[in-house]
Image (tube, helix red, strand yellow):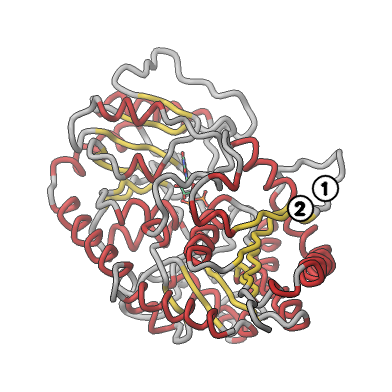
Amino acid sequence: MAGKRPHVLAVPIPAQGHVKPLMSLCRQIAKHGFKVTFVNAHSIHNKMLSASQKRQDEEDDSCHNIVMETIPDGFTPEDDPNNLSMLLENLRRTMPQTLTDLIQRINTSNPYEKVTCFIADIAFSWIFDIADKMGAEPVAFSTPSVANLAFMLHTPKLLEQGILNINGSLQNGVVVSLSNDIPAWRNGEFLWSFSRDPEIEKVFFEFTTKGFKDASKAKWLLCNSCHELEPAATELVPNVLPVGPLNLLDSNSVKSTNFFSEDSSCLRWLDTQPDRSVVYVSFGSSGVFSQQQMDELAFGLELSGRAFLWVVRPDLANGSPIVYPPGFGTGLGKIVEWAPQKKVLSHPSIGCFVSHCGWNSTTEGVTNGVPFLCWPYFADQFHNEKYICEKWGIGLKIDFDEEGIRSRYEIKNKIDMLFFDNKFKENALKLKEMCGKSVADGGTSFNNLKKFIDHLYRR
Ligand code: UDP
């Protein structure tokens, strides 16, 4: 049909670390003139709207081709809209119908812009059937490292061989290695390891394995990494197209996917600090702290004697009010509820990143050449820590004491070690350069994205 325009429908997992990179990918697609409909559950859309001072579609040029749509999230007024596992269960029930209705509405309202491609988080692989039925091409998008993607795709075999049990755990002491060049996995380091409680872990395990079951139905598999960061892992997933790190492709003005309101005052504060002097502390969108751990971190930062920028989300204390320990003063530091993290990490005053090692934070630190102090909580974060410390040599782990706490002295000592040894910064700068080359004209990720975009043109 003459004048037909390719139209991509994008469906993220409803969590901060998934919405952000998928939107970054969509912006690249939209820049090529394709139409994109980005579909969020109602509650997620509302979070983003209230966090944003601007309207969603006023952010940057690419957004003119991006339309935001919402689907019902199935919450009753009594439900907690922050309950992610309930939201995921609700979506599993309702999405086949709500997405079919949405695509039908789009296709009948403008026959020149019918949905031609359907990009969904790979953990929603059960919706690829809908794409097929509606005449759109299913494309999978994976947000964690390629190593963790490879592990997920290998899970059915591990179950079959009895290496993993049906609760998603290994026998005590067992480690799983997929290659000599990829750090091995232990219990508690899997994408479904959200809890130390085996019952809860089992629920997440079932959800994740069901979520990946139909992954092979997607004809394309894109991910937010680059070959140079994880060469051995990309070889394990022959059909994967690494197109990242996607944060490098977004313009700095983009901020519409935040779930929390950004406090940019910290950028002016960073301007007043010497180069490579500030400890940036941030734990992503969902980690929570006990009061004891909060106190140790506060005193550890104070003991380090360095300036720090600490992101303390309003829900960091798991629903309790945020309380700083008696005697703790911000002194050399600044605290914000949510930072413009990309801009912070690219600021020359940043000396190191105390991070929970979520994959987005990992790639954002890496692409800015910032050394890490690793503070993982759950899921793939422990495995990302191994890449940071063991494979790339750009960071140190903050160890637990015998009570399972990261003590103030450990925090102070590791900060000192990171600042005193130049090798972390040197390695980080090399990695930054490699990633930059990968997304630049002719680089591996650049070529992969081009291949996909060229394919969209031909659809
Ligand atoms: N982030 C941010 N400001 C903050 C903290 C985090 O913009 O103060 C962003 C960060 O840049 C990243 C995302 O939130 O893109 C968090 O994703 P990640 O995978 O690191 O962790 P998750 O939140 O999924 O645990």
Q: Could you tell me if residue 395 is visible in this image?
A: yes
Asked whether disc 1 touches disc 2, contact meaning CB atoms under 8 Å apart, the reply is: yes
Q: Position of residue 441 (x, y in %)?
A: 29, 71
Amino acid tagged 2:
Met
Pick whichever of labels 1 and 2 is earlier in the sequence: 1
Left/right of residue 350 with respect to residue 356 in the rendered view: left
Residue pointed to by mark 2: 86
Q: Which mark is residue 190?
A: none
Left/right of residue 51 with respect to residue 298 in the rendered view: right
Q: Position of residue 315 (x, y in %)?
A: 59, 33
Determine whether the residue tagged by mark 1 lies in a helix, strand or loop: loop
Amino acid tagged 1:
Phe
Callout 1 crowding tier (Cα within 10 Å): few <14, some 14–19, many ≥20: some
Left/right of residue 396 with respect to residue 246 in the rendered view: left
Which quadrant holds residue 300?
top left
Q: Is residue 451 above or below residue 246?
A: below
Which quadrant holds residue 117?
bottom right
Residue pointed to by mark 1: 75
Q: Position of residue 257 (x, y in %)?
A: 56, 48
Which quadrant holds residue 392?
bottom left
Q: Residue at x 69, y 77 (%)?
A: 128
